[in-house]
Amino acid sequence: MGTSTEPILQVRGLVKHFPLTQGILFKKQVGAVKAVDGVDFDLRKGETLGIVGESGCGKSTVARLLVNLEQATAGRILYKGEDITRLSGRALKAVRRNIQMVFQDPYTSLNPRMTVGDIIGEPYDIHPEVAPKSERRRKVQELLDVVGLNPEYINRYPHQFSGGQRQRIGIARGLALRPEIIVADEPVSALDVSVQAQVVNLMEKLQDEFDLAYLFIAHDLSIVRHISDRVAVMYLGRIVETGDDTQIYEHPTHPYTQALLSAVPVPDPEAREHRERILLSGDVPSPADPPSGCRFRTRCWKAEERCALEVPELAVPAVFRGLDSPAAHASACHFAEEKTVVPADPAGE
């Protein structure tokens, strides 16, 4: 994958809080769900940034903020240096053409009353300058061919396709306006394992063909490693570790990342037998009332008093300082290190 050094998308201090209210007639805000609480990352042209984490960590909310399906509470989203969180009307419409989304569930993201041709061609109704009506049928058929479907399927309905084929239709719709960025929100999680590989391979092929940048959101770390150039690990609304795929998967420095990777299935029986499994104690805290200091401390075997008092900065761990590009790896842990030894059960039971 060819990537440029200049970021095409920059996210700085991104926050999304959903208000919690009480009352029926006179509602009063009594708190907020801190779904995203200070997220920073860059995305370069032609690059794939994978965002991973448990359900409820805020990764899908980040996706919806990027395409303006949700309004940010605070922070900036810079597309080619322009803050798109402050845009509206025609200016926002123009930017949206270049940032498209592929949704998680191909069964619910396609309108069952519309034909495939109408679904893929719908973006042209919003941006008629991209394709005059006389050219739309041809362009839709070209897109069907590009994603590996028969162009003659243009008059069929979504229920006539398998799950993998429906997701290909969703990808074709995302490509219709020739965007520069595709935000893929768990695009293969609803598919069978064999179909997942086909869709991921298709996305890699399309990335090279159309020079796309992907923000690829998933909870399956194996898939993220396959497609991503860089990885960001999220926990309870914040990024706790980020780096290139080799650094994250071979030298994780944050305890949460280490725990996630220890749960990834290993096909080699001998390697599986000698691998150390990290079992986290307790449940994920509520995003409406996150822990003070480090949000992971309530489940972390390294936690000390300092962790409750100080918010760890997302910074370069000592083991990566002095390398050619140390800024490529950052970890938000007071005790970040290359390797760790933990008991099989942190609770000591």
Image (cartoon, grey):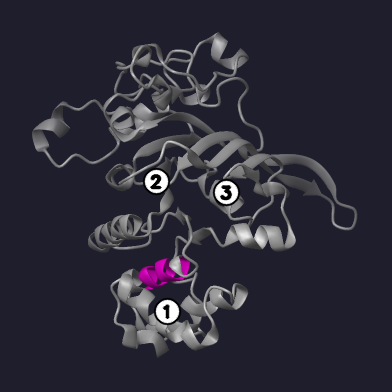
SS assignment at label 2: loop
Which residue position is annotated with label 1? 139
Magenta segment, which residues? 166-174
- Give x and y (percent) for residue 306: 56, 10
Point out the frontmost of discs 1 and 2: 1
Which residue position is annotated with label 2? 219
**Residue at screen point 24% across, 25% down:** 276
Residue 106 showing in the rendered view: no
Which residue position is annotated with label 3? 61
- Give x and y (percent) for residue 205: 28, 58
- Give x and y (percent) for residue 343: 30, 18
Q: Amino acid at mark 3?
A: Thr
Gap between marks 1 and 2 measured at Cα: 34 Å
Q: Earlier in the sequence, mark 1 or mark 3?
A: 3
Nearer to us in this view, 287 or 175: 175
Determine whether label 1 and label 2 are within 8 Å by CB: no
